[in-house]
Image (cartoon, rainbow, N blue to C red):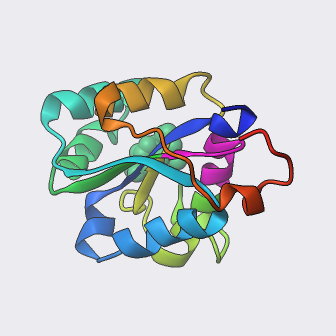
Amino acid sequence: MSHHDERTFVMVKPDGVQRGLIGDIVSRFEDRGLKLVGAKFMQIDEELAHEHYGEHEGKPFFEGLVEFITSGPVFAMVWEGADATRQVRKMMGETDPADSAPGTIRGDYGLDLGHNVIHGSDHEDEGANEREIDLFFDDAELVDWEMDTADWVYEDESH
Ligand code: IDP
Ligand code: MG
């Protein structure tokens, strides 16, 4: 593996699951050339929600955020590829769907800040991707595999 092995944590939130957007969102990352290395359909409990969103504890929207993220199933994923964390954030759009460009996930599917369809690790928060992957996945749940199309996604051979 090489510089194409950056991994990031991504999650379809309860609103995205309820609205039937899992398939579309997975397709966007597949189409981009990213490699899926882990995925699970699960419900987040209170404790995990507090850990995952710990940086927002004390903010006025925190309790509502925890209530929302634990309110129904989510689809948690790990995607791998060159610059994966930043590229996924670009594909997601801004935190507020109202500020997100059409063509981004939040810009295409959301209208409301609290219900913004998707979570992705923040590339501006050093190590957030690895921390979040560890929080949601055991090592054994992540799959090492060769994606044959990588020869066409990347120009060089080092993947
Ligand atoms: P991010 O999801 O784009 O990384 P963060 O600032 O980390 O955005 O906030 C985490 C989540 O908390 C957001 O995705 C959004 O659902 C929710 N959130 C953030 N700020 C507000 C707010 O001011 N009001 C309500 N919900 C918010
Ligand atoms: Mg964030």
* Above or below 76: residue 101: below
Q: Nearer the viewer, residue 135 or 113?
A: 135
Tell me the quarter of the image containing the C terminus: top right
The magenta stretch is 79-90
Q: Quadrant of residue 135?
A: top left
Q: Position of residue 74 (x, y in %)?
A: 25, 54
- Residue at x 52% of width, y 66% of height: 106
Is 19 in the magenta?
A: no
Q: Position of residue 26 (x, y in %)?
A: 45, 66
- Residue at x 22% of width, y 30% of height: 48
Q: Position of residue 59 (x, y in %)?
A: 38, 32
Is 89 in the magenta?
A: yes
All told, the count of numbered labels is: 0
- Residue at x 74% of width, y 33% of height: 3
Q: Nearer the viewer, residue 140 or 24?
A: 140
Q: Quadrant of residue 63?
A: top left
Q: Nearer the viewer, residue 22 or 65?
A: 22
